[in-house]
């Protein structure tokens, strides 16, 4: 069995024209055709579309139209989107299993995930929250969710339940969704960026429920409240700050802080996430590099060691840790707490302004940088400093495991800004002319 397959496939939604006299009927059944690895399978979407109102390039009904059954384009396009989500989940599950599926396997799994199987024992008394639990179990299994992802969706469920313990799909109209947004802002005190994330998670659940036939209310598809947001500030240590932390002489009574500093700096010199440094085993460490499979993305990466990361590994080479771990890593929460103390002791106190919106209110809060330090600042420190040193983004991405250039763009912008400021130093130099 081959693991981690990447199955290339294509999807085509099209009206299946039906003959009528010398021409065609004005409308047709909408079908989905999936092709992969020389295979093909068709699905009936369950709706008819007017041929004159079908837009072939976008594979969608034109907006503000209805079919002959008076069903809106919004409804049909929403179902198309739900079909795309489900068929993606089908292939993702096969890829994770290392299986190149047959048409029968694809059809069977699609029917299972979309609730199209004939099951005479389907419960009719389940609540929206029961379906939400089904969703998290199913999507969690298909996508191999981490405990952190399960926790995110548990929080989504909690917010929905505290908003309305008797919530039904029919309540999630545009009005109901607007009330929910107001609740998250006014009662929960969430920032606009957090509300946007919560709506994204909720829409994922509702698309799944639509595909299954549980949710008939489709207002969520076009629900996009105007929520002002500001660009997220990237917290990292510049090179002088990093060297200050790396070289700080902690006392014998500060051994815990010293170990936290060392693990954090190791992330700063390797780009590792907390989850990966916490799982780094001695068997992952070689003479000139470390090689591991990342926890978050299951990518296999190889990161060359530099003199700083090598020195940290050598410092703890004679120590024994549970699970044959390479470094003395404590819990993420404890490490975040201690990192702020480390930063304060080391004088990492540059003022940083954090701007965010709650509703239409702009809020500016100023913090000393050490209060904003967390384990992920290590990875960001590596990326920003590597780019500012002139290392090509493509090379940095090899180390970090990033596959999307878009994810690197905020860091590249920081590096470009730093280069502009550095160039200004030339302007401050005076010209001396010899006589």
Image (tube, rainbow, N blue to C red):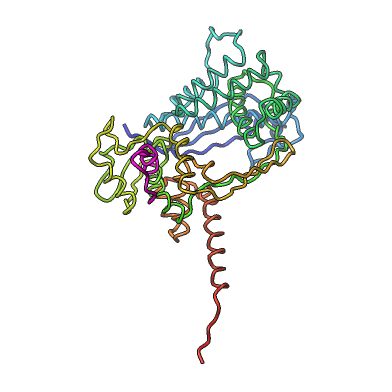
Answer left or right for 342 relative to 362. Answer: left
Q: Quadrant of residue 321?
A: top left
Q: Which residue is at the far left?
A: 318
Q: Nearer the viewer, residue 28 or 208?
A: 208
Q: Nearer the viewer, residue 312 or 13?
A: 312
220 drawn magenta: no
**Residue at image x 49%, y 36%?**
35
**Residue at image x 47%, y 35%?**
337
On the rendered image, what quadrant is the N terminus found in? top left
Answer left or right for 7 relative to 309. Answer: right
Residue 226 at what x, y percent from top left? 72, 38
Q: Quadrant of residue 105?
A: top left
- 201 lies above or below 171: below
Whether residue 240 is visible, yes or no, is yes
- 4 lies above or below 411: above
How many numbered tags mark residues here? 0
Q: Which residue is at the far bottom?
A: 435
Q: Nearer the viewer, residue 13 or 383?
A: 383
Residue interval drawn in magenta: 247-263
Q: Nearer the viewer, residue 431 or 154?
A: 431
Whether residue 19 is visible, yes or no, is no
Residue 270 at what x, y percent from top left? 38, 48
Answer left or right for 34 relative to 128. Answer: left
- 384 lies above or below 154: below
Overall secondary structure of the magenta stretch? Answer: helix
- 373 lies above or below 388: above
Residue 216 at what x, y percent from top left? 67, 20
Answer left or right for 251 relative to 126. Answer: left
Residue 3 at what x, y percent from top left? 35, 34
């Amino acid at each position: 069995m081959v693991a981690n397959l990447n199955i290339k496939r294509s999807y085509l939604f099209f009206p299946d024209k039906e003959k009528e006299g010398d021409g065609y009927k004005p409308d047709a059944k909408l079908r989905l055709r999936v092709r992969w690895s020389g295979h093909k399978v068709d699905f009936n979407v369950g709706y008819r579309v007017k041929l004159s109102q079908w837009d072939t390039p976008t594979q969608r009904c034109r907006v503000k139209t209805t079919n002959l059954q008076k069903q809106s384009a919004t409804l049909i396009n929403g179902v198309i989107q739900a079909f795309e989500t489900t068929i993606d989940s089908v292939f993702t599950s096969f890829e994770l299993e290392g299986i190149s599926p047959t048409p029968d396997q694809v059809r069977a799994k699609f029917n299972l995930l979309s609730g199209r199987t004939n099951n005479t024992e389907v419960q009719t008394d389940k609540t929206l929250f029961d379906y939400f639990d089904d969703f998290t179990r199913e999507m969690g299994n298909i996508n191999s969710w981490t405990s952190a992802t399960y926790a995110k969706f548990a929080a989504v469920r909690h917010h929905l339940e505290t908003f309305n313990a008797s919530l039904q799909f029919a309540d999630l109209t545009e009005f109901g969704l607007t009330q929910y947004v107001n609740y998250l802002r006014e009662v929960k005190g969430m920032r606009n960026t957090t509300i946007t994330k919560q709506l994204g998670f909720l829409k994922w659940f509702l698309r799944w429920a639509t595909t299954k036939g549980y949710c008939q209310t489709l207002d969520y598809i076009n629900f996009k409240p105007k929520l002002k947001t500001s660009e997220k500030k990237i917290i990292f240590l510049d090179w002088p700050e990093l060297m200050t932390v790396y070289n700080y002489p902690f006392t014998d009574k500060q051994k815990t802080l010293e170990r936290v500093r060392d693990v954090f700096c190791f992330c700063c010199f390797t780009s590792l996430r907390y989850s990966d440094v916490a799982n780094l085993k001695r068997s992952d460490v070689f003479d000139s590099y470390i090689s591991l499979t990342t926890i978050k993305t299951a990518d296999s990466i190889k990161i060359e060691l530099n003199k700083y990361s090598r020195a940290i590994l050598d410092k703890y080479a004679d120590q024994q840790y549970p699970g044959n771990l390479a470094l003395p890593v404590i819990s993420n929460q404890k490490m975040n707490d201690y990192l702020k103390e480390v930063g304060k002791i080391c004088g990492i106190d540059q003022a940083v302004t954090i701007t965010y919106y709650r509703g239409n209110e702009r809020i500016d809060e100023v913090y000393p940088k050490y209060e904003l330090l967390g384990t992920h600042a290590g990875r960001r420190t590596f990326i920003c400093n590597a780019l500012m040193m002139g290392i090509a983004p493509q090379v940095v991405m090899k180390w970090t495991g990033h596959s999307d250039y878009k994810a690197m763009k905020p860091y590249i912008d920081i590096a470009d800004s730093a280069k502009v400021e550095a160039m200004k130093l030339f302007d401050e130099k005076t010209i001396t002319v010899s006589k």
